[in-house]
Image (cartoon, helix red, strand yellow):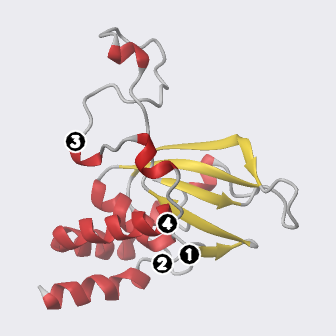
Amino acid sequence: MYVIGLAPHIAHVDTLERIDYFGQYGKILKTVVNKGNAYNAGGANGPSYSAYITYSTDIETAVAILASDQYPIHDRVIRASYGTTKYCSYYLKDQNCPNRDCLFLHHPGDDDDAFIKDENVSNKNLFNDQQKLAFDFLKKHIEDAVETVNNGIKRAPFKQTLPPLVNIKSKLDNFMKEK
């Protein structure tokens, strides 16, 4: 997932992966904080940063997007969406990538996840569209989504910094009833 609106004092891998932050939504495999490009650096609240967070399952990712998007924290608003990536140039040349920390894809991506750059770049509603995609995905996998949320609620502490999973549990429970 891709997250923007992170205050400087939380824009650190160890902070973002904590159980009271994004760790409550699932098993995080990798987090990369982008401090090379500050947003609103001259703004009244100072700069904000972005991060890519990779979860172990698509369900955890969708839950994290739904739970954290548009959450106000530290005088900023977090926006969350599915992250995008490109193929590694070594992979495209059928060569071994020498960078073990390479952030690009080294295997075929799922066709359902692909889009042409021009389709999303100018989309003003990108984050809202991503919320709908995450919700639609969870509706298709509702039993697993409810299980993921329930397991996260058991794992997370009483006080979370980011929105707790119980905030989306009622939405998922309502879908279970409708199903």
User: Which amino acid type corresponds to the residue marked 4 in the rendered image?
Assistant: Asn
Q: Which residue is mark 1?
A: 160
Where residue 178 appears, as percent x and y from the top left, is 15, 90
- Dot 4 or dot 2: first in sequence order is 4
Q: Image quadrant of residue 43?
A: bottom right
* Mark 3 or 1: the one toward you: 3
Quarter of the figure that contains the C terminus: bottom left
- The reply to whether residue 11 is visible in this rendering is yes
Image marks 2 and 1: residues in contact by CB distance under 8 Å: yes
Q: Which residue is mark 3?
A: 111
Label 4: how many Cα within 10 Å (few below 14, some 14–19, many 20+): few
User: Which amino acid type corresponds to the residue marked 1 in the rendered image?
Assistant: Gln
Distance between the Cα atoms at labels 1 and 4?
Answer: 28 Å
Left-right relation of 110 to 18: left
Q: Image quadrant of residue 171?
A: bottom left
Q: Which residue is mark 4?
A: 125
Distance between the Cα atoms at labels 3 and 1?
Answer: 36 Å
* Mark 1 or 4: the one toward you: 4
